[in-house]
Amino acid sequence: MTDSPFARAPLDEKEKPILDRLLEIRTNLELLKQDKSTYVKSQDVIDLYNQVIENTAALNDLRTHKRTEQTRVDTVLDDCFQLISLAFLTIGKNAEAPAVYSALSTMKRLLDHLKEANFFTPKDLAGLDGTLQKYRECITRCDHYSPHLLTLLETRIEVCQNILSELQQKISSMTSELSPTYEKLVSILRCLSACNTRSKFPEDDVKDLQNQLKEIQAKLNNEKKPKHEDENTLKERVEHYIERIKMEDTPTPSAEKLVDDLLERCLLWAEIVLKKQGKIEEGFEDVYRRLMNIRNTLERLQLTQAWSLRETDLYSYQRQLDRIDEARALDGNFVDAEGNKSNLHTQRTLLYLLRKSYALIYHLIISSEPVSEALLPIYNQLLTLRRCLIEVKKDGGVSSPRELYPYSMKLNSIDNMRVDGKFMIGEDIPDGQGAVTQLLEECFELAYELRNDAEEAEEDESSTDEDEKVELRA
């Protein structure tokens, strides 16, 4: 296991026993994560959580006068909290305080990157703000957990809130007239970066996006038209643009300036992308392949999340991304094995993949179902059944109650799995009973409504037939 490359102070000899215990706990958590022969049990996770808290308390007692110190103990402790947090999601305890830790860590990374990238939409920030508020309420509700954990989480929420407020201030001047244009430019810039990482460079798509930029430019009566220039001239324009943006950077720029700057940035990036055709500098091909593999794997997990994701699996992707992110130079540039900085195209391409991967992890965490992985097969079957019943209802229902037999049989077989109203796995009662039971009841209710509608339709049809017979006899 390679730790994230945090700056570390020398290890205090008194902290050595704590480090040894934390390393053992981390090993046990990783073994728990890797064992796919059985589901992760709640008691195993809680026992390891209690051990982490005990060592956190011991560390705090030793550091009464050096709270901000960062040594290898802090790195391993963070690993333990990350794994514990993801394990709480795996066992379905999503609404508990420890489960919040990993999401806050990923959110902090996302906010840092949004600040560095300096382009985002109000919708981006609103989503993060809503999640932050939900976690704040969770911590308030979970006051029975260790104060060591709660203080740590409250501090992280405050850090995230401060960055978020700074970003909200940055676009607070945006007007309703210019907001659609600004959001369109953000979308185009992201699409350009996505095109830049495809296996086969989509030149036509990039040119189409470039044409959309020209249309926006004409609409804004902006006379700075893109020019096809040689690489040196383009590099000078890019460097001039970056320096000007740094010098003109203000906490609350006007809406017009936000749009104009972003438009110029999009036009420059479109030219660079077309010129480079997705080709990365040779010295950065290794990190590019690693980021591409992580991004592609996370996208596949997003498609199959309900059936194939164990949340603790996200830990290895988090750590790989953290190491890549923290290996950058102090000015944020990627450097190759010889210490050479990347050019702008390589830099922006790698940053896009890094940010996209963090965003995928964040989405996978916040969309995790509040159900233990032991109950997920049942939960997923019920989700599919509910989806089917809703579609049947949308299409006008069934013509006969007999058509509902397959759904009813499946629902009854799942209902019969309960023992004293609980879904048991062996002798264990996994977390998420309420969510599974609620979903089962929703499915029964949908099936009942469809059956009633079909029976009423049959009665109406039968009544109509009787009336017709009476008329014929008359």
Image: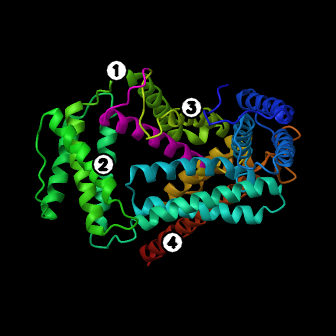
Q: Position of residue 7 (x, y in %)?
A: 62, 36
Crowding at dot 4, Cα within 10 Å, few <14 / some 14-19 / many 20+, comes out as few
Q: Identify residue type, mark 3.
A: Gln
Q: How many angstroms separate mark 4 from mark 3 (CA)? A: 73 Å
Q: How many angstroms separate mark 3 from mark 1 (CA)? A: 21 Å
Crowding at dot 2, Cα within 10 Å, few <14 / some 14-19 / many 20+, comes out as many
Q: Which residue is mark 4?
A: 466
Q: Which residue is mark 2?
A: 189
Mark 3 or 1, which is nearer the eye? 1
| Nearer to us in this view, 87 or 167 | 167
| Nearer to us in this view, 269 or 409 | 269
Residue shown at 52%/67% (left/top)?
457
Residue shown at 73%/30% (left/top)?
30
Element at label 1: helix
Magenta stretch, residue numbers = 338-365
Q: How did the renderer colour the structure?
A: rainbow
Q: Quadrant of the C terminus?
A: bottom left
Q: Is residue 360 magenta?
A: yes
Magenta: main secondary structure equals: helix
Residue shown at 84%/60% (left/top)?
144
